[in-house]
Structure formats: structure tokens, C-alpha cells
Amino acid sequence: MANLQRPLSPHLQIYRWPLAMAISILHRVTGVALSVGAVLFVVILVAVAAGPVSYELIRGYIATTMGQIFLLLWTFALFLHLFNGVRHLFWDAGYGFQKSTTTKSGIFVLIVTTVLTAVVWCAAYLTCKV
């Protein structure tokens, strides 16, 4: 018979997530997001090849606020997955396993991802306004 008075094991809400753990989870999530985005990119290419009517239909969806948010998050996912993948290549070569190094490289990945996402979107905004 089970002892109902024994303490339960703490769950994920109890523990503080280290940066490496959070970025590892983000890396997996961005991989899935990039897969979904790749399928949607193929849909866009098919619409372009199908003619102006199909292209305008897809362009109408992309121009909405939700479409712009999706593209912004997809751009962020692209850069995060890219730079975290480079970080993993260094790990595969045997570099950067110290706790301080993993934290610094994780912060670097987040900063570079955010900056390059902003640069791409600023460049796109300025190009579209000209």
C-alpha cells in the first residue's frame, strides 16, 4: 500500500532554469518553427509561380499584423537557430564547456540574434518605404 504522507518530488516549476537549458529548449522550438516556416515559404513560392492572383492572395495574408508577427518571429528563429548551431559546433569540437563560457556564449547568441533580427527588419522597412 502506498504511503500518502511521503513528500513528492519537486517539479519543473521549483527549479531555476539555467540559461543553457532555456536556449536548448529554444533551439528545439526554433527548429520546429523553421520547418513550419519552410513549408509556408514553399506555399509562397508556388503562389508566385501560379500567377498574380495567387500572389496577391498570399501577399494579403502576409501584410496583416499576424503575418508580420509571424515573419518577425520566423526571422528571430532563423538567427537563433543559426547562431546556436554554431555554438554547438564549437561544443562538438570540445570547446566552451565551462559554466562561465556556456553562459557567455548563450548571452552572445541572444544578443546577436536580437540585433540581426532588428537589422533585417529595419532594412526591410527602409527598403519598402523608398
Image (tube, helix red, strand yellow):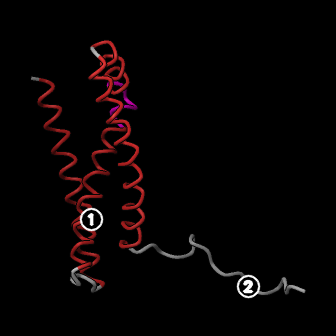
| Label tally | 2
At which x and y percent is residue 36?
A: 40, 44
Residue 41: quadrant of the picture: top left
Q: Is residue 10 above or below residue 130?
A: below
84 lies left or right of 15: left
Q: Is residue 97 above or below residue 56?
A: below
Label 2 sits on residue: 7
Label 1 sits on residue: 85
Residue drawn at x 31%, y 19% as measured from the top left:
50
At which x and y percent is residue 84?
A: 27, 65
Residue drawn at x 28%, y 84% as measured from the top left:
97
* Cα separation between marks 2 and 1: 40 Å
Prevalent SS, magenta region? helix
- Label 1: which secondary element: helix
Q: Amino acid at mark 1?
A: Gly
Q: Amino acid at mark 2?
A: Pro
Q: Which residues are magenta?
A: 63-69
Residue 8: quadrant of the picture: bottom right
- Label 2: which secondary element: loop
At which x and y percent is residue 87?
A: 24, 70
74 lies left or right of 32: left
At which x and y percent is residue 33?
A: 39, 49
